Image (spheres, rainbow, N blue to C red):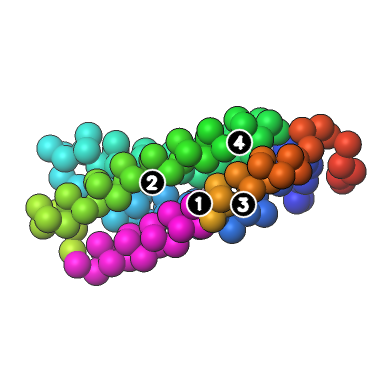
Amino acid sequence: MDRKNINRGFKKLTVWQDAISLYVLAYKILSNFPFELKKVAANSIDAAHSISRNISEGYCRRSLKEYLNHLNIALGSSGEFHSCYESFKQANQITDDEYEQLDQLHYKVENALLKLIESLQKKQKDQNWEDNFQTKYK
């Protein structure tokens, strides 16, 4: 059963879908780190996961100001995650192929986030945003 309502509209966002894919990829690559690196791996996986979580939380707030705030937090998590996998590559803790997989998808997510923020800032400037739930949904 596909459950839909206005509060779950973030699931239609390609940037959210790609952020989920980034989390899954990060988990697949980093969850196999040795015991002594479990903490940094877990923190890195959480940084990747934080991106999608903040996109969805901001969307569900319905206030444009709060939405933009959460998207900026997601962008910060994106930067944090980039720093993580970059340092893993330089320390030879991930392969060149793993780095490339992470970097390609991360770059896509990061740019989509920047475009979404820019689009919403334009709506904010133009005062073209509805904060209510008068949209019909099934």
Query: Element type at marker 3?
Result: helix
Q: Which residue is located at x 25 percent, y 47 percent? A: 83
Which of the pair 35/128 is nearer the observer? 128
* Circles 2 and 4: CB atoms closer than 8 Å: no
Q: Position of residue 119 (x, y in %)?
A: 61, 52
Q: Amino acid at mark 2?
A: Ser
Q: Sequence order check: which comes first, mark 4 or mark 1?
A: 4
Foreground mark, 3 or 2?
3
Q: Is residue 86 above or below residue 42?
A: below
Q: Which residue is located at x 25 percent, y 62 percent? A: 99
Q: CA distance from mark 3 to mark 2?
A: 19 Å
**Mark 3 — residue?**
119
Residue 66 lies in quadrant: top right
Q: CA distance from mark 4 to mark 1?
A: 12 Å
Query: Which stretch did the figure color magenta?
Result: 96-114
Q: Sequence order check: which comes first, mark 1 or mark 2?
A: 2
Query: Element type at marker 2?
Result: helix
Disc 3: CA contacts within 10 A as few (<14), some (14-19) or many (>=20): few
Q: CA distance from mark 1 to mark 2?
A: 9 Å
Task: Report the side of 110 relative to 58 (left or right).
Answer: left
Q: Position of residue 134 (x, y in %)?
A: 88, 36
Task: Report the side of 10 relative to 38 (left or right).
Answer: right
* Circles 1 and 3: CB atoms closer than 8 Å: no
Disc 4: CA contacts within 10 A as few (<14), some (14-19) or many (>=20): many
Residue 32 makes an appearance in the image: no
Q: Amino acid at mark 1?
A: Leu
**Mark 2 — residue?**
78
* Circles 1 and 2: CB atoms closer than 8 Å: yes
Foreground mark, 1 or 3?
3
Residue 28 lies in quadrant: bottom left
**Mark 4 — residue?**
67
